[in-house]
Amino acid sequence: MHYKLSPLIFVLLTISVNAQSLSWPYDHKSLLKELKSTYSQLEIKHGFCQDLRKREITQIENNWLYAQPKKKQELILHVVSSIVYERCTEAEEAQYTMALMNYTSETGDKTFLNEWLLLNKSYYTKEMFDELADIDPADILKLAELPVLYYPFKLLLGVDITITKENN
Amino acid sequence: MKLKSQYCEVKAFNPSPRTKEAIKEMNRISDMSTILQRMLMFTPFFQIFVGPSHKALPSAAPSSYQLSVQDWILFADSIRAVGLIERRQLEKIAFSVANTARGDERKFWECVYNAL
């Protein structure tokens, strides 16, 4: 009897040791680890997207943009620049948001959620919304699809970009 | 860093409530006094980001100041200590103030935005 039980005890001991080395994916420690890991991935992606923004845009050919007043052109290009930047970080941001939701809902700790809310504010003012009130969002989205504006770019303030009519 | 005419000339201005609010918001995202601590000794104008209570300087920003491109390069270098995600937010704030500000205040925020 003593010898027959030995393999069973061995199996149980093995399971017990493995259970200690593996962690349940929804325990707080694992959720925090996942949160930090996805944040690091997001930071890396931001680095990549910000490197892309170093390219210089000197000219944009677009009839609709050309027809807008200068002040409005600047704001429109800022919106387009935000859209294409968010497109660049979208996948990693979704992963981080998912990890954040999992962590917050399981732990009840809202520290990271509150930080994330602060890091996601758009900072569009009422004046900016008023300025864009007569603009069809579809026209802005079309601009974000132009090859010259498709990838992240930084609109430098005080540095003119030549906006011309299209050569048809 | 590209700046208009390679020179961001900004004279001292009375910060509007919007500017003060924006700086407060920037400090919620990143502690500007720590980030800009070293350069405050060389460019007191940037005291605007940390307020007169900061102990690095005996007085607040002088009434008249002209910032050189070198000052802005130092600013841009200091701000690199901020994480990329936070820096992106600081940039959004700077644009939002620049968009509605006028005169030297507008110039100041243009230069902050371009340096971020």
Image: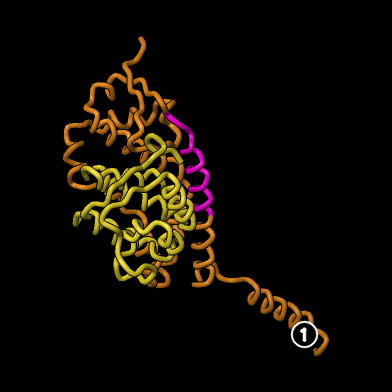
Chain colours: A orange, B yellow
The image position of residue B14, as x and y in percent, is: 21, 54
Instruction: Look at 42% across and 29% down and name the residue there.
Output: A57
* Depth check, front residue: B42 or A88: B42
Viewer-nearest residue: A138 or B30: B30
Q: Chain of mark 1?
A: A
Is A14 placed above or below B27 here?
below
Residue at x 22%, y 45% (from the top left corner)? B101
| Residue matched to label 1 | A5
* A50 magenta-colored: yes
Please report the residue visible at 21 percent of the width from the left and 27 percent of the height from the top. A69
Q: Identify whether A98 is placed above or below A86.
A: below
Three-letter residue code for mark 1: Leu
Q: Which residue appears farthest toward the right when viewing the image?
A: A3
Residue A64 to residue A12: above or below: above
The answer to whether residue A118 is seen in the rendering is no
Q: Secondary structure at mark 1?
A: helix
Q: Looking at the image, which residue is at 33% across and 64% down?
A: B50
A148 w.r.t. A43: above or below: above
Residue range of the region highlighted in magenta in the rendering:
A41-57
Where residue B36 sits in the image (x, y, percent)?
Answer: 42, 60
- Could you tell me which quadrant the N terminus of chain A lies in? bottom right
Q: Main secondary structure of the magenta part?
A: helix
